[in-house]
Image (tube, grey):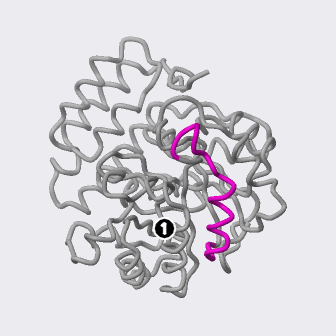
């Protein structure tokens, strides 16, 4: 698979862009465990044009990130073009346009998945962004607005005509948000249409290696994108890659390895924030997903979520290793049938 001049090999694994998740330390952990392509958190075109400091900070990229995309969102074509030029100056390998976010505050502004309501306007906006920069532009979409308005193939054809270099398809509609099952048949229909010449990346419900291989084999997509399943489990990229290469499932990581990686991520957060409490606060969403399937773990999870310093987190991690040394995590507890 290629995006522009970037050769990504066969079935690369993409870390999906996620707000308040795909910041530096989490990207680093996912790259460490085998993610092939990373994305920043999504960046507001309005805030970027207004030079909002917090938004500008999302454009800071690092050597480990490569290849990496900055994802931008907005509803105003002119602002999106301007924002794309600003984002391109940060030196990403490509720009991604968010056409799939279902969050209400973004949809109400006419951005994210709301742009799928007016496909000609969407195409004009995307075409303008493609022409505004000299690096590849991709797009991440949903299947459509709802079951009655799901023109996925037309969306991708228009994006291809607009000049995008690849498209990632989340197999749900805007109305579904994150409920129900992702429709990979719809993704396969796009991938197998002879008129679609750009790479297609499949996204949605990839939460364990066997399913990842099944979805890849049944759709022949060019790459797989993993999002929420990587929260609290950045090694899912290692697990999927190993299964693809060998057909063998890796055992889950030991509690000591999980703890070591939490400590490492906290230190990267501290380097970013310069403040212990802020560094820990960033991890709470992740703490809630680590250590699944261990009986009697609720007390330890509460302690992790209440910790206010790196020292407190380390103390809880030591307790976990001591108290549950004979247990292993069980990700089947977090996977829907």
Please determine whether, in this image, residue 48 is positioned above or below residue 278.
below
Query: For this view, does 259 lie left or right of residue 170?
Result: left
Please determine whether, in this image, residue 313 is positioned above or below residue 164.
above
Q: As rendered, which of 302 and 78 lies closer to the eye?
A: 78
128 inside magenta stretch: no
| Residue at (23, 33) in percent of width and height | 315
Q: Residue at the right extreme?
A: 194
Which quadrant would the C terminus be assigned to in this image? top right
Quarter of the figure with residue 218: top right
Please determine whether, in this image, residue 26 is positioned above or below residue 335.
below
| Residue at (64, 67) in percent of width and height | 158
Residue 49 position, x and y percent, is 27, 78
Residue 81 position, x and y percent, is 41, 80
| Residue at (73, 57) in percent of width and height | 222
Residue 63 position, x and y percent, is 46, 73
Instruction: Name the secondary structure under disc 1.
Output: helix
- Residue bounds of the magenta highlight: 145-164
- Residue tagged 1: 65
Q: As rendered, which of 212 and 173 lies closer to the eye?
A: 173
Please determine whether, in this image, residue 307 is positioned above or below residue 45.
above
Query: For this view, does 4 lie left or right of residue 28?
Result: right
Quarter of the figure with residue 149: top right
Which quadrant would the N terminus be assigned to in this image? bottom right
Classify mark 1: residues with Cα within 10 Å, few (<14), some (14-19) or many (20+): many
């Amino acid at each position: 698979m290629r995006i522009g001049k970037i050769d990504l090999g066969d079935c690369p694994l993409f870390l999906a862009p996620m707000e308040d998740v795909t910041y530096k330390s989490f990207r680093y952990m996912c790259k460490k465990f085998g993610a092939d392509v990373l994305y920043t958190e999504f960046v507001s075109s309005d805030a970027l044009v207004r030079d909002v400091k917090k938004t500008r900070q999302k454009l800071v990229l690092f050597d480990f990130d490569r290849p990496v995309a900055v994802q931008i969102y907005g509803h105003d074509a002119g602002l999106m073009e301007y924002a794309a030029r600003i984002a391109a100056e940060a030196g990403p390998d490509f720009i991604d346009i968010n056409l799939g976010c279902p969050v209400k505050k973004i949809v109400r502004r006419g951005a994210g998945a709301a742009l799928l309501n007016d496909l000609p306007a969407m195409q004009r906006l995307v075409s303008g962004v493609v022409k505004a920069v000299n690096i590849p532009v991709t797009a991440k979409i949903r299947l459509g607005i709802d079951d009655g308005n799901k023109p996925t193939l037309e969306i991708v054809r228009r994006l291809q005509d607009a000049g995008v270099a690849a498209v990632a398809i989340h197999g749900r509609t805007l109305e579904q948000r994150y409920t129900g099952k992702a429709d990979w048949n719809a993704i396969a229909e796009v991938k197998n249409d002879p008129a679609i010449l750009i790479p297609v990346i499949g996204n949605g419900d990839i939460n364990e290696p066997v399913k990842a291989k099944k979805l890849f084999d049944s759709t022949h997509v060019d790459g797989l994108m993993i999002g929420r399943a990587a929260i609290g489990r950045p090694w899912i990229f290692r697990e999927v890659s190993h299964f693809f290469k060998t057909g063998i499932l890796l055992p889950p990581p030991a509690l000591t390895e999980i703890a070591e990686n939490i400590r490492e991520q906290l230190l990267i957060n501290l380097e970013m924030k310069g403040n212990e409490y802020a560094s820990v606060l960033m991890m709470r969403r992740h703490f809630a997903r680590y250590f699944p399937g261990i009986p009697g773990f609720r007390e330890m999870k509460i302690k992790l979520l209440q910790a206010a310093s790196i020292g407190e987190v380390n103390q809880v991690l030591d307790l976990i290793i001591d108290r549950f040394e004979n247990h292993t995590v069980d990700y089947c507890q977090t996977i829907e049938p």
